[in-house]
Image: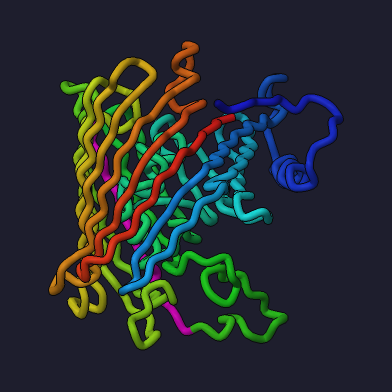
Amino acid sequence: MKKSIRIDGMRSYPVMMTYILLLLFCIPQEATGQDDKYPTIDFWGAFQPRVSYGSMEEGDSSMDRMGFGIRRARFRAEVMLREKIGVRYDADFASGSFQSVDLFAFVRLSEQVTMRMGIMPSAQPRAHIFTPIPLIDGFDRAAIAEQWAGATLGGGGRDFGLDVQYQTPAWTLVAFLHNGDGSFSRSRGNFSQTISSEATTGGIDRSVLATSVYAAHRVQAVEGLEVGGYLSQNSSKNPNTANAFGEGRKYVSYAAHAYYGAAPGSQPFRVKLDLIGINFNEGEQERLGVSVLGAFRLNDHMELFARYENAQLDTRIDGTDFVSGGLNFSLSKLKGGNFSDQRATLGYSMLEAPSGNQQHLVVLQWQFIL
């Protein structure tokens, strides 16, 4: 859940928040009522510690590992003024160090339309960031979605750009104009040069921006049913797209999904279908992944789930199979709250490569949404 604070006096906040507030207060404002005079801050956080056992085969040898770790440790702050303009900042601490994730400004043009600018997740396959942390079905997102991100914008699935979102109970439409690189580095994705540097391009010759669109329709006549898709073209040739020779490639990416019950524990029976593809260099190589998930609710606070995936790094050869399943147990739902706020997931995943080698992973993960 989000924690909201209205700033109406001199209080002590982190330095980052102070800078954001100074920026907002510098924007000229018309005389308004007392409630519109001060910005509000919403805080949100997610923490996912886990214990895991993994094994893998490599030829005639094998490796095993067991131990504790942190999958995600996320903190978010959103400052909003007059319920219309604001700034969102998102950071992750799972690595033990401070790592920025999202940083963007937004303007609510109407109740349905929002415009955003900065670095952020935008139009992309539904199975990736559009399946937010609290609503991940097991302990990780679909493997084909994580592999899509690693081969396009990077694992975070974020990029610098400008998007427009249209949101109603029945529709979500997103159009994204972006750099296509997905990196915070000024030598790659973060184009913020100055004229005094006498290198206004930063040594990069790139004049075509990436474009991506996403659409999802929630069928009002059937509760829980959603269909949608995604399409993108990207000519940045960023390092994530590199081939075996280290050469970056342009690509067209696409995805489609059909969900009956997107959120864990939301209904007695759930099914989710995903297809994600990437076509590099106008047909040089095409990647294709499919994912099928089924879930059955044992009672209002426990759910069984299972998923099968196949990921082809090249559609001309056999793909890798991923099989996973497990049990979600919600302590928060047992106490009358939201299913995903305090949740434990016990799960198993198996990877089988075309060579026949296998990898296995058993995870017990706790989830705390603050």
Extreme residue toward the front, this view: 60
Magenta run includes residue 210 = yes
Which one is in front, 137 or 237?
A: 137
Q: Residue furthest left?
A: 316
Above or below, 89 relative to 11 = below
Please name whichever residue, 197 or 184, is drawn nearer the observer in this view of the structure: 184
Q: Quadrant of residue 252?
A: bottom left
Seen in the picture, residue 10 relative to 28 is either above or below; the reply is: above
Image quadrant for the N terminus?
Answer: top right
353 displayed left or right of 333:
left
Q: Position of residue 158 (x, y in %)?
A: 47, 57
Residue at 56% in and 71% down: 191
* Residue visible at 20% across and 62% down in the picture: 288
Q: Identify which residue is drawn at 57% across, 38% down.
A: 47
The residue at the far top in this view is 336
In the picture, measured across the screen, residue 32 lies left or right of residue 363, that is: right
Q: Quadrant of residue 311?
A: bottom left
Quadrant where the image shows the C terminus: top right
> Would you place residue 224 above or below residue 68 in this image?
above
Relative to the observer, which residue lies in front, 311 or 12?
311
Q: Quadrant of residue 353?
A: bottom left
Q: Nearer the viewer, residue 66 or 192?
A: 66
Whether residue 208 sits left or right of residue 184 in the image: it is: left
Image x and y of residue 246, in percent? 40, 85
Q: Main secondary structure of the magenta part?
A: strand
Instruction: From the top left corner, tell me how far across and down residue 276 is, in percent.
Output: 24, 56
- Which residue is drawn at the image coordinates 42% and 67% (left, top)? 180
In the rendered structure, does residue 69 fall within the stretch colored magenta? no
The total of numbered circles placed on residues is 0
Q: Which residues are magenta?
A: 205-218
Give the image location of residue 151, x and y in percent.
36, 67
